[in-house]
Image (cartoon, grey):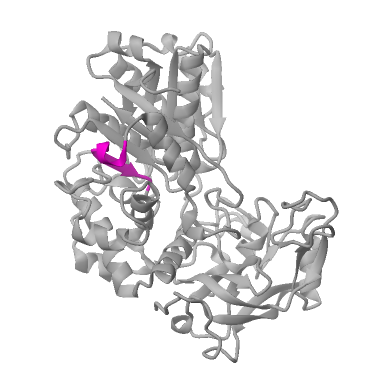
């Protein structure tokens, strides 16, 4: 049990942008130094690191130890499967601290999509190489090496996250009998609500870009039913936070953010970006995992004041409202257009603008936003926020509290 | 130019059957369960040495998406195309693409059947097209057309 045994004591980030001047290594250092300064700690205090596994996280532990002059790491761990690492990296950090394997653990995520492959493109980070490069010469066939069933999907053109999430969103419409208009209204409401949050967030890439329903509906269709603004941003940036014991956290600051629970989960064909060939696609998130998240935290749905849901696409926060048990199955599409998720709603969601309108940091910017909400320092502050949930759609999540 | 599957010892029989215009899935020689994609052992009874069984090639559309914006240069001149997960009559599901139907005519629950297409020298992919008797055979309760 990690409930209230550990706390997030510092957060740091870079600016977010389409193409930042620094490398991912530079960006990681800036975010980590910011998080340590926020905690009142020095790099020499760090003895643990938890991170997203390669190929997602490009900056390694040796790079950080060297560049920060950390004398010795005595615990370091990596979590695979992209967004599925979001809750896992915190769970590992919390486990290490409670087990006495480390005292001060840094968690970070750095992204330089402008210098490497864009997540929204399949070429450039997979077989065939970047368009127009030597590797993509002439009319040569592109051979997809078999790895995690990709050779059964890529030859048909199922290659990128937006296409996979379009299959989920369509399945939701099929099972619940939604018309295209029903789905468009629901997804559009989420995208527009998050954009409005971003318009009031100085960190957000979309701070100055207003969006109304005509902008949303007028945008080009990418992979039906998902339009341009249903998909997340692609950008550079980094986020970091520092985890330590609750007792030490209280000595360091007046407003530590306690970890109530953190989960990771994996079931057959349920890995993010998998091809979902068994079970019900809509049950990507195992209900037992949601139960575990709340039981271990010792709180119920009604105790959650604000939620930051992983949103590679607008469909994911929609379904997450159901998966985490806030709204009955099949009703979130109606709920978001009636109760909504904006300021003053029963459960404000993605108050920073999310991946759709703040920036894409593999969910880590949602963790930082939850910490700001619980400290009472968020741009779109939820009054009196005391408990926050951060969650990815496949069951990688955390509940935090002040 | 085509995007073609790399093969492993485990997956080659699937693609070799496709080249002969046969759709096959793995079958446990002990408990007779079927599954796809291929695994080294039966995921149900864990018996080693699964075999292959030819299936009828009939099924229904479990979900689909019309791709309007290509994310790989190999598909730049192929949009729009319809990706789908098809549930075979025998149970297993597979990723495929729908051919022989206008993009806005594809529906969840629609009956489809396999059709084989040579996409490169020596490479044949199973695609699916609407079954001719659709409309008489919509047995997937709750699957409403949504386009």
Question: Which residue corresponds to the image point at 51% horizontal and 90% vertical from the top-left?
Answer: B135
Q: Is residue B125 left or right of residue A292?
A: right
Which of the image's four quarters has the N terminus of chain B? Answer: bottom right
Q: Position of residue B74 (x, y in %)?
A: 58, 67
Question: Which residue corresponds to the image point at 35% horizontal and 14% vertical from the top-left?
Answer: A246
Nearest the viewer among A4 and A219 is A4
Q: Position of residue B94 (x, y in %)?
A: 63, 66
Q: Quadrant of residue B125?
A: bottom right
Q: Quadrant of residue A183?
A: bottom left
Q: Is residue B113 left or right of residue A193?
A: right
Q: Position of residue A248 (x, y in %)?
A: 35, 9
Instruction: Determine if the magenta segment contains residue A301.
Output: yes
Instruction: Determine if the magenta segment contains residue A20.
Output: no
- Does residue A332 lie above or below A26 as drawn? below
Residue A22 appears in the rendering? no
Please report the bounds of the magenta region as a residue range: A300-310
- Does residue B20 lie above or below A143 as drawn? below
Nearest the viewer among B7 and A60 is B7
Q: How many marks?
A: 0
């Amino acid at each position: 049990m990690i409930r209230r045994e550990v706390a997030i004591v510092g957060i740091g980030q870079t600016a977010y942008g389409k193409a930042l001047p620094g490398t991912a290594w530079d960006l990681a250092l800036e975010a980590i130094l910011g998080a340590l300064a926020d905690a009142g700690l020095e790099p020499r205090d760090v003895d643990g690191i938890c991170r997203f596994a390669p190929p997602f996280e490009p900056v390694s532990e040796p790079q950080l130890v060297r560049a920060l002059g950390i004398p010795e790491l005595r615990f370091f761990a990596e979590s695979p499967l992209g967004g599925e690492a979001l809750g896992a990296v915190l769970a590992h950090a919390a486990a290490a601290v409670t087990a006495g394997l480390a005292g001060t653990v840094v968690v970070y995520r750095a992204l330089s999509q402008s210098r490497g492959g864009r997540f929204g493109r399949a070429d450039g980070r997979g077989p065939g190489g970047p368009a127009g490069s030597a590797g993509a010469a002439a009319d040569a066939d592109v051979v997809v090496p078999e790895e995690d069933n990709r050779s059964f999907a890529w030859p048909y053109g199922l290659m990128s996250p937006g296409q996979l999430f379009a299959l989920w969103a369509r399945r939701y419409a099929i099972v619940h009998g939604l018309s295209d208009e029903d789905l468009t209204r629901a997804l559009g409401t989420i995208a527009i609500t998050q954009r409005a949050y971003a318009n009031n967030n100085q960190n957000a890439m979309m701070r100055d870009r207003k969006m109304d329903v005509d902008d949303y509906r007028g945008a080009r269709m990418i992979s039906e039913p998902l339009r341009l603004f249903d998909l997340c941003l692609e950008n550079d940036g980094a986020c970091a936070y520092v985890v330590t014991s609750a007792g030490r956290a209280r000595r360091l600051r007046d407003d530590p953010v306690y970890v109530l629970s953190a989960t990771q989960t994996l079931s057959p064909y349920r890995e993010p970006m998998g091809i979902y060939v068994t079970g019900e696609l809509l049950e990507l998130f195992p209900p037992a995992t949601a139960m575990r998240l709340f039981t271990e935290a010792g709180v119920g749905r009604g105790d959650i004041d604000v939620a930051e849901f992983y949103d590679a696409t607008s469909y994911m926060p929609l379904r997450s409202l159901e998966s985490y048990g806030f709204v009955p199955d099949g009703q979130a599409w109606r709920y978001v257009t009636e109760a909504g998720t904006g300021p003053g709603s029963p459960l404000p969601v993605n108050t920073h603008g999310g991946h759709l309108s703040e920036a894409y940091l593999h969910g880590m910017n949602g963790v930082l936003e939850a910490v700001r909400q619980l400290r009472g320092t968020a741009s779109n502050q939820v009054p009196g926020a005391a408990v926050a949930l951060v969650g990815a759609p496949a069951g990688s999540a955390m509940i935090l509290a002040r | 130019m085509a995007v073609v599957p790399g093969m492993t010892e485990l997956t080659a029989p699937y693609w070799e059957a496709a080249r002969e215009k046969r759709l096959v899935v793995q079958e446990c020689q002990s408990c007779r369960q079927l599954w796809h994609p291929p695994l080294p052992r039966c995921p149900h009874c864990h018996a080693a040495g699964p075999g292959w069984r030819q299936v009828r090639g009939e099924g229904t559309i479990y979900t689909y998406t019309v791709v309007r914006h290509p994310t790989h240069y190999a598909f730049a001149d192929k949009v729009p195309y319809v990706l789908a997960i098809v549930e075979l009559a025998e149970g297993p599901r597979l990723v495929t693409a729908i051919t022989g139907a206008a993009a806005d005519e594809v529906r969840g629950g629609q009956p489809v059947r396999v059709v084989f297409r040579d996409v490169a020298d020596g490479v044949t992919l199973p695609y699916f097209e609407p079954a001719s008797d659709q409309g008489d055979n919509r047995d997937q309760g709750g699957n409403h057309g949504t386009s």
